Amino acid sequence: MLDSPEQNEDYMQQAIDLARIAFSNDEVPVGAIIVDNKSNKVIAKSANRMREKKNATCHAEILSIHEACDHVQNERLVGCDIYVSLEPCAMCAHAISIARLDRLFFGAEDKKSGGVFNGPKIFESSATHHKPEIISGLCSSESSQLLKDFFKAKRNNG
Amino acid sequence: MLDSPEQNEDYMQQAIDLARIAFSNDEVPVGAIIVDNKSNKVIAKSANRMREKKNATCHAEILSIHEACDHVQNERLVGCDIYVSLEPCAMCAHAISIARLDRLFFGAEDKKSGGVFNGPKIFESSATHHKPEIISGLCSSESSQLLKDFFKAKRNNG
């Protein structure tokens, strides 16, 4: 691995930029990118597109895993990391486990709907057979503010 | 709802038939169908296709939810039920919650990888905001035997 704290923050910033795109499309602002550690290249990136796609499974992480699996032509993403602007929900956390991603970087915690440090704490479960290294808190205030602004705007618009 | 125990078993049998297709394709034998309660019609069905699709997220339930959302052109499947041959994992259980499915019928429990009665028990979590009615144990011996046969064959083939 050739990464550095600066590089990790740069990747997280790319995930946050995708979250901003989600926000502008009236989607819950979450973005995710997947990086291949060997080449240090971004192999997948997606904003949350649940409403646009009219599909309950189209969270940013699921779409990114889908794209990355297509890219490497393998259902396992060994040697790859995922950067997510917000703590993944249980669906996405377990998908990260099934995909065997090496490391999970995420920004702000999601106390209401998160599944990593909150809720069902997926990676502490005996039914989760692969547990990535977890690095949380990168650019968390930016990610958290984005989420607050989104739900504030939603409340103000009725 | 116009269903009856016989009809529920018939739907579960269709899910098990899909699990047999998965088995014959060298996939973990799981099948799922989604039924619209209003019309009593099957609107989506899928076998597990993770290896074929080379995609970690292509469990039978995720593929069925995807197909059903496409069918109704909505990310919420209110008024629909899902029948799965095996207890869903955490990823699929939480997807069932996000999709707002009314009822979850499943066959055998999955003590190793299940996420409903086992592991992270997704529907007991405060981070799971919709909880379907759960009806378990339909045709469970058939579903369980299929899984045992699959892993026995895997062990015998090295």
Image (cartoon, coloured by chain):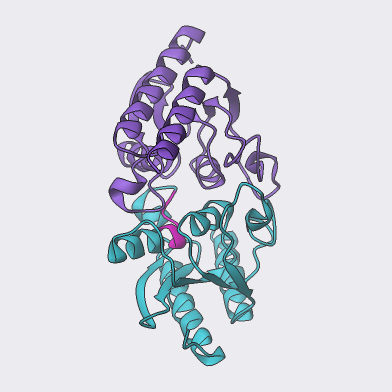
Chain colours: A purple, B cyan
Horizontally, residue B137 falls left or right of residue B15, namely right
- Tell me where residue B72 appears, x and y as whole percent: 30, 65
B60 in the magenta segment: yes
| Residue depicted at 59% across the width and 82% down the height | B139
Question: In this rendering, does residue B112 appear at all?
Answer: yes
The answer to whether B79 is drawn above or below residue A157 in the figure is below
Q: Which is more toward the observer, B46 or A138?
A: A138
Question: In this rendering, does residue B158 appear at all?
Answer: no
| Residue depicted at 35% across the width and 82% down the height | B39
Label total for image: 0
The answer to whether B103 is drawn above or below residue A56 in the figure is below
- Tell me where residue B8 appears, x and y as whole percent: 52, 84
| Residue depicted at 40% across the width and 23% down the height | A16
- Tell me where residue A8 appears, x and y as whole percent: 47, 15
Which segment is the magenta one?
B57-62
- Tell me where residue A71 appears, x and y as whole percent: 31, 37
| Residue depicted at 57% across the width and 68% down the height | B86
B45 in the magenta segment: no
